[in-house]
Image: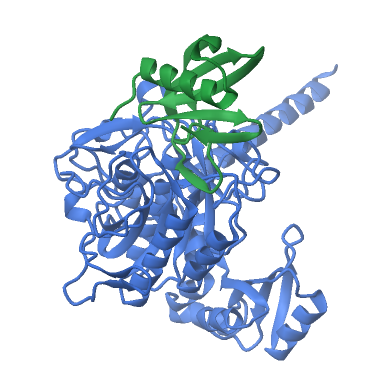
Chain colours: A green, B blue
Amino acid sequence: MSISKDDAVEKARKDLAQRLKVDAGAVKEQSVEEADFPDMALGAAEDGEMSGQMITRGWRIRLGANEQNYEYRADKNQVRLFKFKGKNYRI
Amino acid sequence: MNRNNFLLHLALAIVLILIAAFAGQLSRWRKQWKSHVRIMPVAEKRRASTAEEIALAEGRSTRAEVLVKFKSSVSSETIEKIAERLHDRIEDRIENDPGLEAIDDLDDADAAEIVAQYSSLPEVEYAEPNYEISLDTTSYALVRPSDPRFEDQWALSNSGQRGGKEGADISATRAWGTTTGSDKVVVAVLDSGVDYTHEDLAPNMWTRPANLTPYHDNELGTIEDENGFNAIDNSSDPMDENGHGTHCAGIIGAEGSNDIGISGVNWKVRIMPLKFMNAGGFGTTKDAIEAINYVIDRKKAGVNVRIISASWGSTQRSRALEEIIRKAYENDILFVAASGNANTNNDRNPHYPSSYNVPNVISVAALDRNDQLASFSNYGPKSVAIAAPGVDILSTWLGNQYEEKSGTSMATPVIAGVAALIVAEHPRISVDELRQKLLASVDSLPQLKGKIATGGRINAAKAVE
């Protein structure tokens, strides 16, 4: 099923709240912008993952919590957390 | 100045003007000749010579000669001893490519024999005829297909449409004067699968021949691979749920001149669809390995699958993936791989599988419609071999659609497609020769010098000569 921009932001907020063990309300949306990512894993491949090397249009979602900034990347197929404590995650 | 001095100066000025005009004409002639050169092996030329020329050859004025690349571990002394043992002479050493030697055979043997002799040695990475560039007075026919959207395929024929540079293409229309491909050549598209029902692809899809037994794997069991292989669920259905694999397949072999959609680099070919990436366009290393293993198995079973097109990758190195690609090499299969889209130098930050140092891997960078390296394309003067169009490439998409996409993903099947044209024209070519033929078939571009190994864009017409 295709993911909309709003769905992606919501999934990202919930994911970050769970990871940080904070209320969803404590996660602030800083910006959401359209972006071209370098590949079909949105430049955020997990370990052992290969992806198509096609420029992929999606959204860069920046969230803030506990005075820290976090970046999620999404397109119609997926939502990913970019370099969270040095690692990428597919949500 | 007296009258005599004036006349002397006037004569000198006229001579200088004539010399300059002649030099300008020479330069124009040289440019015209350059657009009509073709490459043929020295040995082939000798075979086609007149009796008088053969006699000249027998007088050793033109010797059979080969280029031999020895492995990096082989010393100069050992190379000299090998040449001496085979009664050959090292004519030249290529300084910037250690181990590459131009060798004369003192017995005047056929170049193909010498190539075979050296290729069989464990010390040798590859050997090939020394191609001689000669003037060709034949004119080239330009073949244009009837596909209605061909005008949008700048990669195949760039007339300057949409702000592009005229001639910044792979010279496909000239190549098609020699060959438009063959349904005897199979190209494995290792990707998100392929929409094998697409109207512009269906006639060129591979299906398992009736006399070939179904695929059997000790762990997976027997799979009825009528239409290819799906490594995600180990099934026989490689239907694409993303579109990426269908796009790559169309670049290689959308049926040409059928009055539908677009033309592939090959009008006729057989595309073997393999699925290891899901609807999102990503997959696991393990499934990629399973799919390559399938290709090797089918090759061993008699399928003429000569090329794997791999428009995917990551920065993570996998020894297991490298080893299975080496197995593909041992089975005479070329592995064409995307260099990556991070605009980084792969010599410093490798991208896999394109950066594996395996002899069948050819790493591909992307160009835009002005012959410039695409803003996103990875590069690497040592590790990225060749460039091909990869921006705003029109090709097949799910549901009988067509879309423009960009990436080294799109440049990769251009090279895989040209490789298939070469195999159609030279069915017995080895994987080493095929790779070398591709690398020797580029149009040099100054802007790529120092960026990629060949410094050029693939030219399909040169490749099929």
Q: Tell me if I can see residue B56 in this picture.
A: no
With B94 as the anchor, is B255 left or right in this view? left
Image quadrant where one finds the N terminus of chain B: top right
Q: Tell me if I can see residue B305 in this picture.
A: yes
Q: Position of residue B313 (x, y in %)?
A: 51, 46
Image quadrant where one finds the C terminus of chain B: bottom left
Q: Nearer the viewer, residue B435 or B16?
A: B435
Q: In this view, does A36 lie above or below B394?
A: above
Q: Which of B317 and A2 is in front in this view?
A: A2
- Residue name at image x 53 percent, y 55 percent: B362
With B373 as the anchor, is B93 left or right in this view? right
Q: Where is residue B457 in the image (x, y as percent from the top left)?
A: 50, 43
Q: Which of B448 and B15 is in front in this view?
A: B448
| Furthest-right residue in this view | B1
Q: Is residue A28 above or below residue A46?
A: above
Q: How many marks?
A: 0
Q: Is residue B100 above or below residue A21?
A: below
With A9 as the anchor, is B455 left or right in this view? right
Q: Position of residue B234 (x, y in %)?
A: 32, 59
- Residue name at image x 19 percent, y 70 percent: B209
- Residue name at image x 27 percent, y 53 percent: B238
Q: Position of residue B23 (x, y in %)?
A: 63, 38
Q: Quadrant of residue B292?
A: bottom left
